[in-house]
Image (cartoon, rainbow, N blue to C red):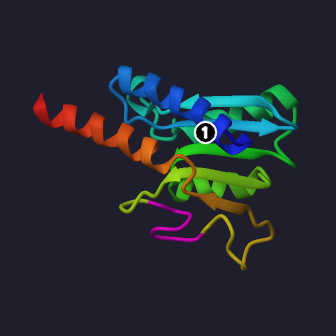
Amino acid sequence: MTTDEQFMREALALAGQSAQAGEVPVGAVVVIDGAIVGSGSNSPIARADPTAHAEILAIRQAAAQLGNYRLTGATLYCTLEPCVMCAGALVAARIQRLVFGARDLRFGGVRSKFQVADSAILSHRVEVVEGVLAVECVERLREFFQAQRRR
């Protein structure tokens, strides 16, 4: 198992927590020097907060732990392609690298609809790696939405 797969498995576990809580199953971890410094699972419903996406929560936790809003040298692992809001947060936090599993064809802000994270017009560009454990990430989402339709 590669390092990217190892940390994506951590994000998948967090996505599972979101699904258990009835939230769209998305999980994210921020890693610096091989250690997780922030984690988040999607929870906008439970928190009554439209910004409570897994990526935002992981970035907030990492910044608080490090005492710095700039997360230079960090990699964010996320099970789903970040939306435009989250992609903007990656740039603002100076995340070095983004690794995501599944594309979000409806709202993707990194590859599917927009290319915010590595746009040439911004002062910071995030290195983007996609498709890590994509099958598992897509399956988690498929199972969740299939269960929602049965309700």
- Residue situated in front as seen by the camera: 51 or 139: 139
53, above or below 13, in the image = below
Q: Give the quadrant of the C terminus.
A: top left
**What amino acid type should be assigned to the residue bearing mark 1?**
Met
Displayed quadrant of residue 92 = bottom right
What segment carries the magenta color? 108-115
Q: Position of residue 37 (x, y in %)?
A: 77, 29
Identify which residue is drawn at 57% across, 50% down: 132
Q: 49 left or right of 128?
A: left
Question: Which residue is outermost to the bottom?
Answer: 121
In reply to whether residue 112 is colored magenta, the answer given is yes
Which residue is pictured at 67% across the width and 62% down the height? 128
Quadrant for residue 77, please give it. top right
Please state the horizontal and vertical placement of residue 110, each as a whole percent of the image.
Answer: 56, 64
- Residue in the picture at 52% in, 26% down: 13
Does dot 1 land on a helix, a strand or a loop?
A: helix
Q: Is residue 127 magenta?
A: no
Residue 10, image quadrant: top right
* Placement of 10 over or under 130, stated as above or below: above
Which quadrant of the figure contains the N terminus? Answer: top right
x and y, in percent, of residue 57 in the image: 61, 33
Q: Residue furthest left?
A: 150
Can you give x and y, in whole percent of width and height, for residue 46 in the image? 41, 23
Q: Is residue 97 left or right of residue 21?
A: right
Query: In the picture provided, is 6 more to the left or to the right than 32?
Result: left
For the residue pair 25 and 138, the one nearer the viewer reads as 138
Predominant secondary structure in magenta?
A: loop
Q: Is residue 13 above or below residue 119?
A: above
Other residues around mark 1 within 10 Å, as few (<14) / some (14–19) / many (≥20) = many
Task: Name the residue at 72% across, 38% down.
Answer: 30
Name the residue that disc number 1 marks: 8
